Image (cartoon, rainbow, N blue to C red):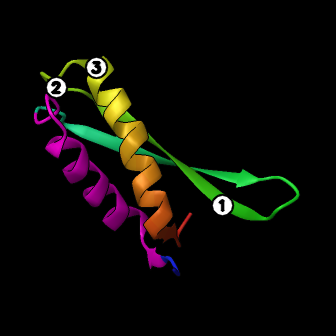
Amino acid sequence: MSKTQISREELQVKALSAVRCEPGCDGVKSVNLTSVKVVNDDSIEWRLEITDAGDADPRLAYRAADRIKETLAARYTLVDF
């Protein structure tokens, strides 16, 4: 299965929406994507971070972000970094 190319802004919107759908995370206010260049591979990976958990439990939000990142990383390739 090939990955769909997506912009940082689009992926960030999808990620925030997905995190907010997780139990106890509907109050998350913002997330951030951080690009990481893989040495000796010339590929770009990204991290999903909760920047404002709002009224959600931060521990739940961080765990949800990890799960969402894995799901989205399997489906999308970040094109602008």
Could you say where residue 53 lies in the image, as x and y percent from the top left?
23, 27
Classed neighbour count for the residue bearing mark 2: other residues with Cα under 10 Å, few (<14), some (14–19), many (≥20): some
| Residue 65: assigned label | none
Q: Which residue is mark 1?
A: 44
Range of magenta residues: 4-26
32 vs 20, nearest the viewer: 20
Q: Where on the picture, by quarter, is residue 29?
A: top left
Q: Which of the marked residues, 1 or 2, is nearer the chain's N terminus?
A: 1
Q: Which residue is mark 3?
A: 58
- Residue plotted at (42% across, 63% down): 8
Q: Where on the picture, by quarter, is residue 71?
A: bottom left
In what element is the residue under mark 3? helix
Classed neighbour count for the residue bearing mark 3: other residues with Cα under 10 Å, few (<14), some (14–19), many (≥20): some
Q: Which residue is mark 2?
A: 54
Classed neighbour count for the residue bearing mark 1: other residues with Cα under 10 Å, few (<14), some (14–19), many (≥20): some
Marks 1 and 3, how far apart in space?
27 Å
**Residue type at the position of mark 1:** Ile
Question: Which is in the foreground here, disc 2 or disc 3?
Answer: 3
Question: Viewed as shown, does residue 14 lie left or right of 46?
Answer: left
**Residue type at the position of mark 2:** Gly
Magenta highlight on residue 7 = yes
**Residue type at the position of mark 3:** Pro
- The answer to whether residue 23 is above or below residue 9 is above
Residue furthest to the right in view is: 40
Question: Viewed as shown, does residue 36 lie left or right of 11?
Answer: right
Marks 1 and 3 close (CB-CB < 8 Å): no
Marks 2 and 3, how far apart in space?
8 Å
- Residue plotted at (16% across, 25% down): 54
- Residue plotted at (36% across, 28% down): 62
- The answer to whether residue 18 is above or below residue 11 is above
Could you say where residue 16 lies in the image, as x and y percent from the top left?
25, 48
